[in-house]
Image: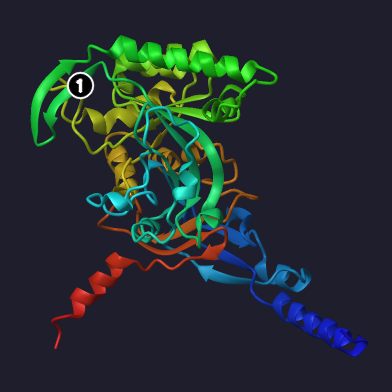
Amino acid sequence: MDRFTIIISILFLSFICQAQSGSVNAIAFNGGTAHLGNGEKIEDAQIVIHRGSILFVGKNGSFDVERENKLNDSFFAETINTEGKHIYPGFIGLNTIAGLNEIDALRQTRDYNEVGSLNPHVRSCIAYNTDSEILPTLSANGILSVEASPRGGRISGKSSLMRTKAWNWEDALIAEDIGIHMNWPNQFNQKGWWANPGGIEANEKYDEQVNEIYKYFKEARAYVQLKQPETENLRFEAMRPLFEGEHKLFVHVNSARTILEVLEFKKEFKLNLVLVGAKEAWRIADLIAESATPVVLGNLHSLPEYRSDDVDQVYRNATILQDAGVFFALSLAGSWEVRNLPFIAGTAVAYGLDYESAIAAISGNAAKISGVDNLGILAQGNRATLLISNGDVLEMKESTIEMAFIDGEKIDLENRHTALSKKFRTKYKK
């Protein structure tokens, strides 16, 4: 390349950089109610996002956008009037198979259940399908990130926190391999199926299955304690971050008695443990709070465990845990069902849970349980992942999500549902 060509190239790049420096790289949302995701809210709020992060959160008018535009050469903002609107942090769907499952009836579209029983080395993130038709329907309801979690076996594998809008799984990745999922044995099993239940029978192999778990964890711990193992064991190597406190153990368990056994298991191995599902956690909420064990509650839109329980018991579970001081988040375990997560939180509010606590249960609390500090809460320095709603987002009849941003980038909320709605609304018009 000759000298003249180099000079021309430098001048051209300089021109491009100057042109880009004058483009909009910030947005100021002025007015509206900001629900921060940590149990607090700000009426008539102002939120400024800049280059993918939240620059300012406070009362409307506190941040002078025009002055900043003039004084700061690297700051060029547009303003959006959000008076009468609601601003929320992006919601987080914990314990889901969204992105790992497309059509329930087609085995080739299900990629969440690995062969075998003990698979701590399996990583869900590499199977995450960003081209899924399901993920855009989640984004349109405010779920902007999900914990893609494996299923099946005794130890299912590792989950990761993923964006619901991205080009590929690497771009979607927010937090890699946040924890290992394990299914605790059931003491009692339901016979038949949900449409034709056949009663309950005791699991005669329960003690044997629990002993197998203890044996496996003791072997894994002994392996990790070796300075130089003679033979590398990939499954035990996958458990190493668990014993070193870097990963969490998500234990899927429901009955009160088995939850107590899981809490003893936590003490034995000194694990950073999270209870998942925990349908009967309300019965021993004080003990769970005392153990400082977080809970990811399962679907509140379900029947209670026993016929003797109140029919609305499950709806009140979140309130009971809140009153006992348990740190918890709300979840839906499926794939397409996850789009209803805000309405699950709305049900909890209808049965006694504080509104801002319900928002935190699907945003800030969920992020903290995932081990991510800069997501789920509208605060300075956090990721600019948020949504603007016309109406209460927990009320399906009142709310419409008008805009959503992931890391400061506005995303398209169109999806197959909205396309079909437009099609059939206009199909028969003359």
Q: Which residue does the numbered mark 1 point to in the structure image?
A: 189
Q: Is residue 183 visible?
A: yes
Q: Looking at the image, which is closer to me, 415 or 226?
A: 226
Q: Residue at x 76, y 79 (%)?
A: 18
Residue 271 or residue 301, whichever sits in front: 271
> With 420 as the anchor, is 40 left or right in this view?
right
Residue situated furthest right in the rendering:
3
Between 214 and 229, the one lying in front of the other is 229
Q: Residues within 10 Å of mark 1 (few under 14, many from 20)?
A: few
Residue 231 in which image quadrant:
top right
Q: Is residue 328 above or below residue 372?
A: above
Please tell me whether residue 292 is drawn above or below residue 63 in the rendered image: above
Is residue 138 or residue 98 the one in the foreground? 98
Residue 40 visible somewhere in the drawing: no
Residue 49 located left or right of residue 269: right
Q: Position of residue 381 (x, y in %)?
A: 65, 50
Give the residue displayed 12% in from the left and 22% down from the top: 307
- Image location of residue 397, percent across then percent down: 25, 57
Q: Amino acid at mark 1?
A: Asn
Position of the C terminus, as image quadrant, is bottom left
Q: Quadrant of the N terminus?
A: bottom right
Badge 1 element: strand
Q: Position of residue 150 (x, y in %)?
A: 40, 39
